[in-house]
Image: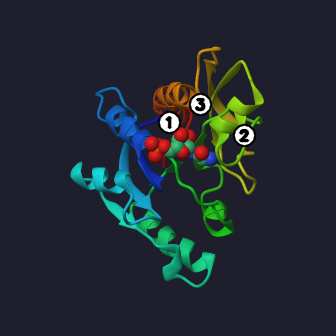
Amino acid sequence: MQNRKGKIAVFLSGRGSNFDSIYKDSLKHDSNYNIELVISDNPDADGLVKSREYGLNTFAFKRSDYVKKKEFELAILDVLNDHKIDLICLAGYMRLIGKTLLKKYEKRIINIHPSLLPSFPGLNAQKQAYDYGVKFSGCTVHFVNSGIDTGQIISQSIVEVLSSDTLFSLSKKILEAEHIVYPKSIRKYFKTMELK
Ligand code: GAR
C-alpha cells in the first residue's frame, strides 16, 4: 500500500505537451504522484520554459558539455539522487538512455511512443504508420531498456485511421490519446509500487 506520493522526474527535449498533461494530472486531488524535477538535454526547450513558469525544479544538461555519455549521465544521476526520484518519465526526450542511468533506475524509467509498439519504433512513428496505410494506430507507454522502444509494455491507446485523415490529423489524434494514457500509466505504476 502506497503511503506517500511518488516523486517523478520528467525528461523532455522539446514542446513538452505530454509534460503539461502529466503536470495537470499531478495537481488533481486524487493523484498519487508529484513532478519533482524536469530535466532537458535542450536548454531552449519550450517544455523547460513552461516548467519554470510552473515553478518546478528544472535542469538543463547539454550533452556537448561532457566528453563521455557516462559523465553526462552521472551529472543527471546526481540531481536525481538529490531529489530521491522514484520514477523517470521520458516525454519527448529524444536521446537514448545509456547504461549508467539504466542500471541505477532499472524498471524505473518509462517512455511514451506515438505508435502501437512493436510496430513502428524509432523516429517519425506517426509518419511510418500513416505511410504504411494502417487502419489503426495509437501510442504506447513502456518501460525503457537498452533497445529502441523495445521495453515491456505498460499501456496502449488505439486511434482509428480514417480515409479522411492526413498525417497531421492522425498525429493530432495520437497526441490527444498520449495526453490521456501517460498520466493514467503513471498512476497505475505507483498503485502497484511499494515506495520506501
Ligand atoms: C510525442 O508524440 C512523443 O510520443 C514522442 O515525441 C512527442 C513529444 O511531444 N516521442 C517519441 O517519438 C519517442 N520515441 P511533446 O514534447 O509535446 O510531449
Residue shown at 55%/28% (left/top)?
174
Q: Is residue 89 left or right of residue 30?
A: right
Question: Which label lies toward us, 3 or 1?
Answer: 3
Q: Looking at the image, which residue is at 72% across and 32% down?
A: 131
Q: How is the image coloured?
A: rainbow
| Earlier sequence position, callout 3 versus callout 1 | 3
Say which residue label 3 marks. 167
Residue that numbered label 2 is attached to: 152
Q: Position of residue 40 (x, y in %)?
A: 44, 61
Q: Is residue 79 left or right of residue 99?
A: left
Instruction: Mark 3 and mark 2 in contact? Answer it, CB < 8 Å.
Output: no
- Disc nearer the start of the sequence (3/2): 2
User: Can see residue 116?
Assistant: no
Q: CA distance from mark 1 to mark 2?
A: 15 Å
User: Which residue in the structure is indicated by mark 1?
Assistant: 186
Depth order, front residue of 167/12:
167
Residue at position x 77%, y 36% from top?
A: 118
Residue 119, compared with residue 74, is above or below; it is above
- Identify the residue at horizontal 57%, vertical 80% (top origin): 71
Percent of width and height locating residue 165? 59, 20
Say what amino acid the circle numbered 2 marks. Answer: Gln
